[in-house]
Amino acid sequence: MLAAQRVLVIGLARSGLAAIHSLHKQGAQIMGYDQKTFDSLGTVGKELEQLGVQVVNQWDPDLISDPIDLIVVSPGVPLSLPIFEWAHQQRIPIIGELELAYRLKSDQVDLLAVTGTNGKTTTTALLRYILEKDGRLAYYGGNIGIALTSLIENLDEGVVVVEVSSFQLETVENFRPPICGLLNITPDHLDRHKTMEAYIEAKSNIFKQQLPHDYAVFNYDDHCLREIAEKCPATVVFFSAQQQLPEGFFINNDVIVYQHHQETTQICPVGDIRLRGQHNLENVLCAAAMSYLYGAKPAMISDALKTFTGVRHRMEEVIYNQGVLYVNDSKATNPESVMKALESFQQPIILIAGGRNKGSDFAELAQVLANRVRDLILLGEARQEIKDAVMKTSFRNIHEVSDLTEAVDLASQLAVVGDVVLLSPACASWDQFPSYEHRGDLFCKLVRSLVEQSPD
């Protein structure tokens, strides 16, 4: 399919490099474009050189001696760059690494896809965990784990649960998961998408190619998703954490059930679920619904829900030290996810927040934290924006610091027995860290070092 085709890969980080390796195995002729200099690419540049990939860091169409057949773009690259206007003029197809992986996968490999503003990673990991419990060859990838093309090229059979972001969904064409799940849609990444309408349109691409016998699982409690579901070509199945439904997955007498054609299937008592928080109940319902529709047995779903403890950087309980719980929620990169985290605790909270704003409005978060937080520690580029929003409330226990090390040190001094110290930034990490994982890893390292410093 791709042999001898000339493919331009734009963005040479994780997914771009994975795409290049897959394209190379397919026999494609590859050019790579990244705004970084070749030297700053480091080992990646040398790796590409060994593969025979021509790398450029400044775009000049005059340098293209032969026509380009296909462009593969990494999700972190905005489609507003001039190179894409040129590509449209030349009528060159533009796809992302997600679409490339879908085209390259074996027919014996199913892709189940999860999207939403918040909860994607937890739901993806839980769904994979359930399917493994049910005896399937199950994997996960996409926006988490390894790049999807790297995973797909080594699989002949099995099921892959794919976490898909709005960035990835901007550049799909044929991508058609037999089952997809949509958790929620709230304002996020508006620095990239500019409008909520564009953001919703990107998210909706997850089901655009589905057929009537496919399934799309929607959160009924999200008004926006109920509207979107009306346009879905697949069989729509709703779940709700807040009300009982005529059909779908919901809570009845503190038990997760599936109601279908007046027949009720019990899945798992809510009290047996290990994950903390109302927002995680939505994630559980989505994963339970998707796994059941894929054929997982209710008993296996229940066993998984009773033992799954969560994933790193999402409400990760790191340590108890001197009666204080330290929680790493570094993945909370927008206000909505922070509000859900705050609602998960009854104890007094010392909140560490800030970073690079992704176009969010902090007004609603300010109101919530004014009622739920005892001390607020701010850092990063957006600290003044958050402070300005909070100062419009009556809350005044605001502390500003220069970095995460100083934040943890201050939090440990402020905390008393029974408190929760919560890193839940409401912002991206890119002002001070390469990723939210790096930010969360440093937080974990810092709080674990407190144990070593504590007196016996």
Image (cartoon, grey):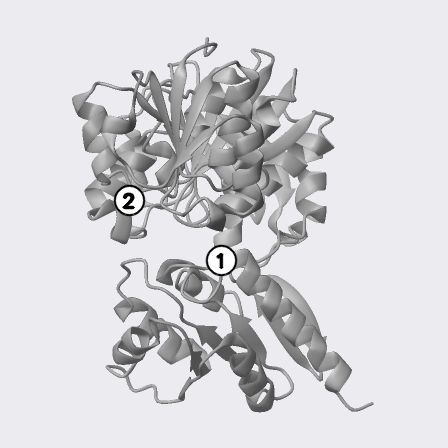
Where's residue 49, x and y in %?
53, 32
Mark 1 vs mark 2: which is more N-terminal?
A: 2
Q: Secondary structure at mark 1?
A: loop
Can residue 325 be seen in this snapshot?
A: yes
Identity of the residue furthest to the left in this view: 89
- Taking 245 as reference, is 446 left or right? right
In front of the other: 278 or 68: 68
Give the Cα separation between the discs numbered 1 and 2: 34 Å
Q: Secondary structure at mark 2?
A: helix
Q: Tag on residue 205?
A: none
- Give the answer, above or below, for where 6 lies relative to 286: above
- Taking 301 as reference, is 402 left or right? left
- Give the answer, above or below, for where 94 lies relative to 420: above
In front of the other: 291 or 149: 149
Is label 1 or label 2 in front?
1
Please name the residue that numbered disc 1 is placed on: 434
Where's residue 104, x and y in %?
51, 17
Can residue 264 be seen in this snapshot?
A: no
Using a 10 Å C-alpha cutoff, classify the residue at mark 1 as few (fewer than 14 neighbours), some (14 to 19) or many (20 or more).
Answer: few
Q: Tag on residue 223?
A: 2
Where's residue 442, x and y in %?
60, 68
Using a 10 Å C-alpha cutoff, classify the residue at mark 2 as few (fewer than 14 neighbours), some (14 to 19) or many (20 or more).
Answer: few
Which residue corresponds to the image point at 57% horizontal and 18% vertical from the top-left? 25
Q: Quadrant of the C terminus?
A: bottom right
The answer to whether the residue labelled 1 contacts the one labelled 2, judged by CB atoms less than 8 Å apart, is no
